[in-house]
Image (tube, grey):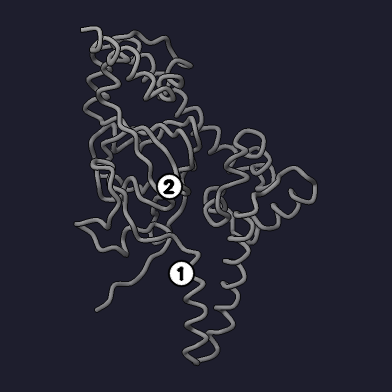
Amino acid sequence: MALCLINDIYIIPLLMEYPISQLRKIHDLSEPFIRDLGKMIRKLEPRRYNTLLLAGDICRDLYLIESGMLACFDVEGNKRYCTWIMTPGDFVTAVDSFNNKVVSTETIIALEKSRVWALARQNFEELTEKYLEFRDIRQILTDIYHIQSRVLDAKRKRHPEEFFDYLVENYPLIAKKAPVTILASFMGISRPKLYEILKIARASGRCKISNTFTVNSFTILIFNHLQSIFVLFSHPLCRFVVQFFHYKNQPNDKAFHPADSRFSCSPTQPSWLVNPLRKRQPRC
């Protein structure tokens, strides 16, 4: 009995110390709630560009980011764009699909190697029904989501320089670490425009971009221009060089299935559909 008590009260909170600490910032937690949460929550570690949710699926999990960065992509017409970027401490899900059990139009991917905690919708509803403190936490998280959405929508309508300054001040990890292409899509501007903003920001010392981020973005920019030049030539070697470096700097085609914490291509969709950042035509 003593061993069971130790397992229930001490070991489980120790293993999930991060999610407990984040929830306690919002509301006090009872020991029965912590025990039940420990039996339901799952730790996942997606690698860079692994997929947590594919468009066309129903979102069945709420995620809490402990480390890394996630992004969500939606499609309007033939245009694919980034709707949000989330960092450690953020709670993440496809809201409409998760709440209403409908097919999601969004795709959620990890922009870098991450550690997230996942809670299935069924467990989410059970905890809401059973514990008053989690009911309050759910309402507070919903209010935060709506407030952040309204603020970001308003900031996007301002000049891009002002929006970037807002991100540097309030979301420094996004401004400093998010890939250029995805950050430009999130801000609703072109990539050349974002390069201009970053150049000014670096010159003024307002934003220090990580080395990996700068090198990868610069490499992609160079070979995008080379591709436009080499298209004038038909030599196979030119095409091979461009394609090699182009695909080397693109996300992989691996999908992430959180239900069993394994990484593989989707069994129901072609691998070229998995990647939200690269649309490849299927072979006849």
| Position in image of residue 266 (x %, y %) | 24, 56
Residue type, label 1 = Tyr
- Residue 175 lies in what quarter of the image? top right
| Position in image of residue 24 (x %, y %) | 44, 15
Q: Earlier in the sequence, mark 2 or mark 1?
A: 2
Q: Is residue 189 above or below residue 70?
A: below
196 or 29, which lies in front?
29
| Position in image of residue 191 (x %, y %) | 60, 59
Q: Which mark is residue 227?
A: none
Q: Residue at x 38, y 54 (%)?
A: 75
Q: For label 1, count other residues whose C-alpha is less than 10 Å away and answer few (under 14), some (14-19) or many (20+).
A: few
Residue for badge 2: 110
Q: Residue at x 54, y 90 (%)?
A: 233
Is the N terminus in the top left, top right, bottom left or bottom right quadrant?
A: top left
Q: CA distance from mark 2 to mark 1?
A: 18 Å
Residue for badge 1: 247
- Residue 217 lies in what quarter of the image? bottom right
Helix, strand or loop at disc 1?
helix
